[in-house]
Image: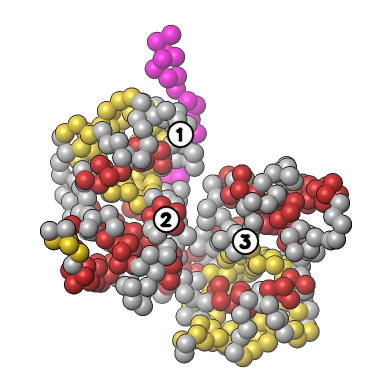
């Protein structure tokens, strides 16, 4: 089959640093070509070349065998190339229909006809979204559908998906993969970038691995085990992904939760966590895991039950009270709740605990520099300067800044909610090492993750939630995905009030 797109000998440098070096990549019509690699490997830069966002220093782009010079994103769109970035480019205050046809609205608009065309495009994707609905009112999954419909409205022949499922629930991610399979079957060429290798293996016809701005190899899923792919990406096998867990001594109880009820439907949750212990909180998205974490952190109110922290009654009404009590939370929404993207790295690190960098109410710049530099080195954060904004860092290093913020508070209990979401394989290993380190230092650690292998690889035991209840607990001999899902999806037990009725 002839190539729909060919990128030949692409080279690009930024300020003397080689982002791409002699890269050759091709895409066929009616195929999904997976693109893998660690953050900084050059994947997004290569796709920005394909999307006309940046011009390469050398090399050429061929579309159906004909060399084309793409002068910008609009030029690429005219040639049937659409790039759907992880950060969606929608106008939140406009309607679904207006977003789909934005930039291509004809004079003398027939709004009824426009909404009808929008509805047809959305229904082709298997969804029923009102064309007149305001985009800001839609779920993230439905916003993703609008992005795809927008691409299809332009008679797109090539669609690039950059980490499309990073913020989707498991169910929504499954539906998106089905949409992509349908697009492939209709003859559209798909480039699929993701850190979720299970998705890559499910839908990709070919997989290209990049490292340090170069192509390592292009392989097929059937001929390449996951372990081999990871070795290509990071230079070590899957068996070493979680690292060697250090010997830890499980100590005294730090947190006890008894019969916890929340106004949002969480009910009768009871468990305990000890020093030196990593306890997983598993279950499907929407099972109540994050809500329990937020209640422990004082971000959401409690309607019943009680909590004990370090053998003393614990009832935080705000996150500030939780932090002062020795509790930290790395939230699942890193960019929205964990860091301030436009703020300097050093300020992000010290924002939760300014005591070490102040004296008698006065700020001490030298103390701040020393403290932040120590944490940067300890967590191996890769950055230019601590004065740079956090937005300048890769996803993995942004997550390390969030961890550094909580290391600075020296918590007794730290909750990690989806700690490696949107993080590449290499950075995941470093974060896993930090989790082991926290436990070895005697911290009590709770890990929430939708990646079951992550829970099993990191945790001493896993608590399983379903429909707002704690359904059971798995110990290492029972660390199997089937057992976790069986517990999570088990039939709901009657609530206490129902039993007493």
When asked about the image quadrant of residue 419, the answer is bottom left
Q: Nearer the viewer, residue 261 or 274?
A: 261
N-terminal label among 2 and 1: 2
Measuring from the top left, give residue 365's x and y in whole percent.
Answer: 21, 70
Q: Which residue is identified by label 3? A: 89
Measuring from the top left, give residue 495's x and y in whole percent.
Answer: 42, 20
Residue at image point 76% right, 79% down: 63
Residue at image point 32% right, 49% down: 329
* Label 3, label 1: how far apart the Cα atoms are: 34 Å
N-terminal label among 2 and 3: 3
Crowdedness near tag 2: few (<14), some (14–19) or many (≥20) residues, C-alpha within 10 Å:
many
Of labels 2 and 3, the one closer to you: 3
Q: Which mark is residue 466?
A: 1
Quarter holding the N terminus?
A: bottom right
Above or below, comparing residue 393 to residue 337 in the picture: below
- Proximity of marks 3 and 1: CB atoms separated by less than 8 Å: no
Q: Which residue is identified by label 2? A: 334
- Looking at the rendered structure, the secondary structure element under dot 1 is strand
Above or below, comparing residue 55 to residue 109 in the picture: below
Of labels 2 and 1, the one closer to you: 2
Q: Which residues are magenta?
A: 480-501
* Label 2, label 1: how far apart the Cα atoms are: 24 Å
N-terminal label among 3 and 1: 3
């Amino acid at each position: 089959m002839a190539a729909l797109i060919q990128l030949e000998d692409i080279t690009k440098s930024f300020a003397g640093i080689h982002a791409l070096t002699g890269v050759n990549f091709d895409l066929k019509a009616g195929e999904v070509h997976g693109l893998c690699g660690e953050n900084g490997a050059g994947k997004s830069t290569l796709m920005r070349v394909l999307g006309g966002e940046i011009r390469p220093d050398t090399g050429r782009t061929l579309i159906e065998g004909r060399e084309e010079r793409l002068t910008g994103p609009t030029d690429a769109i005219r040639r049937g190339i659409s790039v759907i970035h992880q950060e969606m480019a929608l106008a939140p205050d406009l309607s679904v229909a207006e977003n789909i046809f934005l930039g291509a609205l004809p004079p003398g608009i027939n709004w009824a006809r426009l909404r009808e065309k929008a509805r047809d495009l959305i229904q082709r994707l298997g969804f029923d979204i009102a064309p007149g609905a305001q985009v800001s009112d839609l779920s993230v999954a439905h916003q993703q559908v609008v992005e795809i419909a927008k691409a299809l409205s332009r008679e797109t022949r090539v669609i690039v998906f950059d980490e499309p499922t990073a913020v989707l629930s498991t169910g929504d991610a499954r539906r998106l993969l089905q949409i992509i399979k349908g697009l492939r079957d209709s003859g559209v060429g798909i480039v699929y970038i993701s850190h979720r290798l299970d998705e890559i293996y499910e839908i990709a016809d070919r997989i290209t691995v990049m490292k340090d701005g170069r192509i390592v190899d292009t392989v097929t899923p059937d001929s390449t085990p996951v372990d081999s792919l990871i070795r290509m990406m990071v230079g070590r096998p899957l068996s070493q992904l979680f690292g060697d867990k250090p010997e830890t001594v499980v100590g005294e109880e730090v947190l006890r939760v008894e019969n916890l009820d929340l106004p949002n439907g969480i009910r009768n949750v009871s468990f305990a966590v000890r020093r030196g212990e990593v306890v997983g909180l598993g279950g499907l998205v929407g099972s109540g895991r994050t809500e329990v974490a937020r209640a422990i952190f004082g971000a959401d109110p409690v309607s019943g039950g009680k909590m004990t922290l370090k053998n003393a009654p614990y009832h935080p009404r705000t996150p500030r009270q939780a932090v002062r009590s020795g509790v930290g939370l790395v939230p699942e929404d890193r960019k929205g709740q964990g860091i301030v993207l436009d703020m300097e790295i050093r300020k992000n690190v010290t924002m939760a605990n300014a005591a070490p960098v102040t004296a008698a109410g006065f700020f001490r710049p030298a103390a701040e520099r020393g403290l932040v530099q120590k944490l940067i080195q300890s967590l191996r954060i890769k950055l230019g300067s601590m004065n740079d904004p956090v937005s300048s860092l890769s996803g993995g290093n942004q997550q390390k800044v969030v961890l550094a913020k909580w290391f600075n508070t020296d918590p007794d209990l730290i909750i990690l909610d989806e700690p490696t979401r949107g993080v590449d394989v290499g950075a995941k290993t470093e974060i896993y090492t930090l989790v082991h380190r926290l436990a070895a230092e005697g911290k009590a650690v709770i890990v929430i993750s939708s990646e079951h292998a992550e829970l099993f690889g990191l945790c001493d035991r896993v608590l399983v939630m379903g429909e707002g209840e704690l359904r059971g607990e798995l110990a290492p001999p029972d660390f199997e995905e089937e057992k976790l899902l069986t517990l999570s999806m088990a039939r709901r037990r009657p609530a206490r009030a129902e039993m007493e009725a």
